[in-house]
């Protein structure tokens, strides 16, 4: 079992920055890929960024050049550095991990990010 707890959300003005953190506990050595998803009001949850156990990263097009994902496998942490924030980045952000085998998905409880224009 893996537990994920996010922190770092809040209210920021457009153009500002925030850093989200996710602390994993439990069987952190079994974690494979990790990532951040977000869900805006009235919209489906979407992937923001992902990072493999080996450190390869991917980003959705709308955040490339503004967001940076990183992880520390030794302590089971994941972070998302968000710069040049826009109103459209407003959403609840969720930490995600898959672990195993047997492959199991885990989600954090979510943290709210609100960007005022």
Image: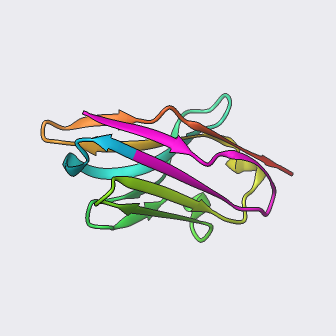
Residue 73 in the figure: left or right of residue 110: left
Viewer-nearest residue: 60 or 100? 100
Residue 39 in the figure: left or right of residue 50: right
Quadrant placement of the N terminus: top left
Viewer-nearest residue: 105 or 73? 73
The residue drawn where x is 33% and y is 67% is 56
Residue 79 in magenta stretch: no
Looking at the image, which residue sits at the far top? 42
The residue drawn where x is 22% and y is 42% is 27
Residue 60 visible in the snapshot: no
Residue 56 visible in the snapshot: yes
Looking at the image, which residue sits at the far bottom? 65
The colour scheme used to paint the residues is rainbow
> How many numbered marks, from 0 up?
0
Expressed as whole percent of the image width and height from the top left, the position of residue 51 reads 37, 59
Looking at the image, which residue sits at the far left? 101
Query: Looking at the rendering, which quadrant does residue 97 occupy?
Result: top left
Q: Is residue 11 above or below residue 3?
A: below
Query: Looking at the rendering, which quadrant does residue 53 occupy?
Result: bottom left
Main SS of residues in magenta: strand
The residue drawn where x is 71% and y is 62% is 17
Residue 11 in magenta stretch: yes
Q: Is residue 61 above or below residue 6?
A: below
Expressed as whole percent of the image width and height from the top left, the position of residue 99 reads 23, 43
Q: Is residue 77 above or below residue 96?
A: below
For the record, the magenta segment spans: 1-23
The residue drawn where x is 72% and y is 65% is 84
Residue 74 in the figure: left or right of residue 7: left
Expressed as whole percent of the image width and height from the top left, the position of residue 23 reads 42, 47
């Amino acid at each position: 079992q893996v537990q994920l707890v996010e922190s770092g959300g809040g209210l920021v003005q457009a153009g500002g920055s925030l850093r989200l953190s996710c602390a994993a506990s439990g069987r952190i050595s079994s974690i494979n890929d990790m990532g951040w998803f977000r869900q805006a009001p009235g919209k489906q949850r979407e992937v923001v960024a992902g990072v493999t156990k080996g450190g390869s990263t991917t980003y959705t097009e709308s955040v490339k050049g503004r967001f940076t994902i990183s992880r520390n496998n030794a302590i089971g942490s994941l972070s998302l550095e968000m710069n040049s924030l826009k109103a459209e980045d407003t959403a609840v952000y969720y930490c995600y991990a898959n672990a195993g085998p047997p492959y199991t998905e885990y989600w954090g409880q979510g943290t709210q990010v609100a960007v005022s224009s």
